[in-house]
Image (tube, rainbow, N blue to C red):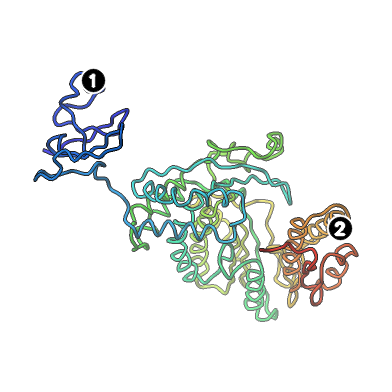
Amino acid sequence: MMSRVLHNPLNGRLTARRKPFSYEVAESQIGSYHWSSTEYNRNNARNVNFNNGNANNNNKYNGNVVRPVAALEDYPPKDFISSVWEAYYDCMRGKRRSEQAVEYMQIANEDIPVLAEELWTGCYKPGTSTCFLVRYPKLREVFAASFRDRIVHHWICLRLNPLFEDRFVEQGNVSFNCRKGYGTDKAVEYVAEGMRRVSGNYRNKAWVFRGDLVGFFMSIDKERLWQLLERFIMRKYHGACKDILLATTKTVVMHRPETDCILNSPPSWWQRLAKNKSLFTSESGMPIGNLTTQLFANFYMSHFVAYVKWLFRHRNYCFAQFVDDFVLACDDLRFLVDSLPRLEKFLRGYLVLTMHKDKRYLQPVSHGVLFVGSFIKPGRLYLSNRTVARLKEHCEGYDKMVSGQCDTIDLQHIECTLNSYLGFCKRRRTYKFRKSLMSDNLYDNFYVKGHYESVRLKRKYRPITI
């Protein structure tokens, strides 16, 4: 009969042969228990004299079988631990200077095997998140997971994201958010080309509809999302550790970070936040800020994309989706109008989402459409008024910051932000606008490249690298 391993409050493990272990029994009948380093007799075990440090053989060369000190456990294999290390390095990419990354690097060698064992045995539980509010351009609640949890998020996404990409390709690449090689520019170009194609180069009549969803991330139903993900993984994933992937994905999806978080913004700010914009006051929703939330949300909306493709399968149409915004162009106005209630019914019944009643736009394609920060007109693109106002506000703030006390880190942040906006603007008709943004203070600290297409920090202000 195989003996059972028990815990000793002082030295770790004891082995009982017949009776269940209790501390009372151990104290009264200690002679019936012996250390787990031997199978039959405690005299066969190696031990060390704590007084002088001498090692005693205790007849260790006899023919009896010696048993390991630690009990045999289900430990993850090396290839699984290597996969967690791969997720760690993927998570570290571009984040090596962040505070949490630097702190975790000091314990990575000890904690990565522990994290792998937690995933392997199904004992993994997400840690404490940091919650804060972003005030610009509008008030938004963000949850930042701990660095350890982000490693798990990357481990999941490294396995599911290729399958998501295959799904998006099959649907015609009409989803443009959170995908490598895609983004706002690709989305705008696709919609502009689709409007031109549907209208026969603007010679025929065609109409375009732009819709929005109410509180998208806070309205995602966790149960419904997990059902769709479980079915998708069971059908499409054929790699190793499928059971671990299912269990870990469910743990991440069903986790409620609002129950274990640290507030990093004044609590009074939440009073100005709408109830349907916060996880603290919503019955459902996914935390904004996690990598898994972005990818799972895109997968969630792919079912809406599939329904639109089926509904308009015999029509001349164009469809594009970016997070919760979507554009639908068609040359049949009556069919387009009649399809809107069916789209609302599908969103409400299948995905538990609601189409915004006020943020709707239906006009001929010749009038243009506003989509992801650009106003798309026949043959030309313009910046939206919100983007123009936001860029002006940034430049005015940077002008005041540069004229006062500004260190190297601040200048690096200004450089990155300006290049992001200028890169978005250079494909629009914004030459005079970009030129007007450059003030004398910015010229003193930055070089301006091309036709005001990008800026570069002057050498004397660049950080010293070792």
Judge left or right: residue 367 versus residue 16: right
Q: Which of 50 and 230 is in front in this view?
A: 50
At x 69%, y 51%, the residue is 358
Label 1 residue SS: helix
The crowd level at tag 1 (other Cα within 10 Å; few <14, some 14-19, many 20+) is: few
Q: Is residue 98 positioned above or below 3 on the image?
A: below
Q: Name the residue under label 1.
A: 27
Q: Which mark is residue 262?
A: none
Residue 96: x and y in percent read 59, 57
Going by the image, does 25 lie left or right of 124? left
Quadrant in which the C terminus is drawn: bottom right
CA distance for labels 2 and 1? 77 Å
Hey, which residue is sitting farthest front in the picture? 52
- Indicate the quadrant containing the N terminus: top left, top right, bottom left or bottom right: top left
Q: Where is residue 184 in the image (x, y as percent from the top left)?
A: 65, 66
Q: Is residue 264 above or below residue 8?
A: below
Indicate the amino acid at tag 2. Answer: Asp
Q: Which mark is residue 399?
A: 2
Please tell me which residue is depicted at 43% across the width and 65% down the height of the picture: 163
